DNA sequence: CCCTAGCTATTCAAATTTGACTAGCGGAAC
DNA sequence: GTTCCGCTAGTCAAATTTGAATAGCTAGGG
């Protein structure tokens, strides 16, 4: 599940039901075009693809008055579980590539869809992985140019290392904030935890 | 010009001439599969595409003894200028999306292909842009949830901000190192500056 | 009242990426 | 001496991404 898919799924869930342009605008208002790579085409593709896979269902096609008809979508039960499953997985798993950060950022964007305890616990797990990665990079830097890489590739590793450190302290800070009661989480209010109207309650995952 | 293209072009240039698998292995040895997104298919595609565009030319197809024949490539004059142009552009321009970092990382990987003065000057330019971006993010954070985004999107902006700060100090550090004479740059040694045939491969493999 | 610009909502062809797959050969284990 | 594994080198179909193009509507300036 890519970052784009998670974002699209999550925004549709937020609205209860939504059409492509609505999703696009919401994501733009989060600057998601910057930190994820959300282009219009990708959104519409994701909507259709997930509809074909049964995660979304088409809800109605209403004339918008201005411009083309709107095609609305909402989550199916399967979409809801897939959303929660992916959200938790992206939050907890650092992943092997540095660039997988987009998936994590997407997950953070929907953090309040989880219970507070759950969120903290997943972030703590992430933290241990980040620390592990810090160790591996230290290793790469220590081996230096021993394995024939040009020496200046070290500069790259130093950047990677610094960004990992940043990630570690930001994660610590977020955990702190959650513990301090910041944000309204799924177990505490109606804002994010319960998906749209007319739909079954949140499916629990452990 | 994507990160992958720059990396492929740069590695072929390093070797004087190279075949796909050789490029792949070199990039793997830099962990470029992690920080750029270098998959085998992309490399071969980039080679063919750039050959079709006249940046590379096919050099020979020799039987390798083991496995399929090797298809060798080397840079054309146009490829050389395109390489240097892109390298400098990626180094200097922060770009609008956070994810464009891959292009920058690729550029850093070939830093010594530039003269020392030139590299420093481009990095200084980059620094001013990074500082500018820091200001914009501060703005986003200040406006807070004023514009209706869920409050926790702020957490995202804080991470973005922290990573920018990291980028700034890392860039400063790199400039310092360059000024202190670290790395052998194009105007100082035979290692990276002069491409082309007649040169032994920079990197040794066993 | 006409013209331009910009918003709405989506589609589409072309480009790129993904990663599983082929196929030959050497060496090690049994 | 044969079975299995892994390396070399690259191909390919399918999936995804890109971003330009469409077309109807409205608001505002001149």
Image (tube, coloured by chain):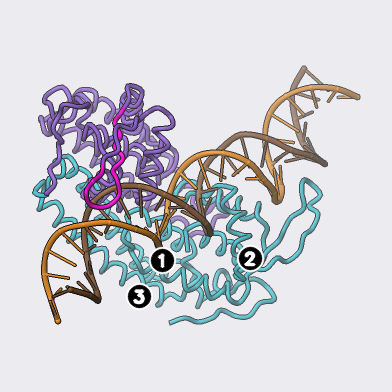
Chain colours: A cyan, B purple, C orange, D brown
| Badge 3 element | helix
Q: Relative to A22, is B197 on the left or the right?
A: left
- Same chain for mark 2 and mark 1? The answer is yes
- Which dot marks residue A90? 1
Q: Residue at x 44, y 62 (%)?
A: A108
Residue B63 location, quadrant: top left
**Residue B141 image position (x, y, % from top left):** 44, 49
> Which region of the structure is painted magenta?
B63-75
Q: Chain of mark 1?
A: A
Q: Disc 2 is attached to a residue of which chain? A: A
In the rendered image, residues at marks 3 and 1 fall on the same chain: yes
Q: Pick the residue in front: A137 or B98.
A: A137
Tell me the residue at 24%/34% (across/down). B17
Q: Whole-Å distance between the Cαs marked 3 and 1?
A: 13 Å
Q: Which residue is mark 2?
A: A51
Residue A109: where, in percent of width, then height? 48, 60
* Residue placed under numbered mark 3 in the picture: A121
Q: Which residue is at a point 60% across and 61% down the rendered structure image?
A: A49
Chain letter for mark 3? A
Asked if residue B72 lies in the magenta stretch, the reply is: yes
Compared with A83, C14 (above or below) is above
Sooner in the amino-acid sequence: mark 3 or mark 2: 2
Of residues B27 and A158, the one nearer the viewer is: B27
């Amino acid at each position: 599940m890519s970052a784009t898919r998670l974002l699209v799924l999550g925004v549709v869930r937020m609205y209860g039901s939504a059409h492509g342009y609505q999703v696009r605008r919401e994501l733009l208002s989060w600057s998601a075009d910057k930190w994820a790579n959300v282009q219009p085409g990708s959104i519409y593709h994701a909507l259709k693809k997930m509809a074909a896979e049964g995660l979304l269902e088409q809800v109605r096609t209403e004339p918008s008055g201005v411009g083309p008809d709107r095609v609305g979508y909402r989550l199916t039960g399967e979409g809801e579980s897939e959303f929660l499953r992916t959200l938790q997985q992206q939050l907890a798993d650092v992943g092997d590539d540095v660039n997988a950060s987009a998936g994590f950022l997407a997950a953070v964007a929907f953090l309040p869809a989880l219970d507070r305890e759950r969120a903290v616990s997943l972030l703590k797990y992430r933290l241990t992985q980040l620390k592990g990665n810090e160790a591996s990079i230290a290793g790469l830097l220590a081996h230096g140019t021993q394995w024939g890489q040009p020496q200046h590739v070290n500069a790259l590793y130093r950047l990677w290392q610094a960004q990992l450190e940043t990630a570690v302290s930001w994660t610590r800070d977020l955990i702190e904030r959650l513990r301090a009661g910041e944000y309204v989480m799924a177990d505490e209010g109606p804002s994010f935890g319960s998906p749209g109207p007319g739909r079954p309650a949140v499916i629990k995952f452990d």
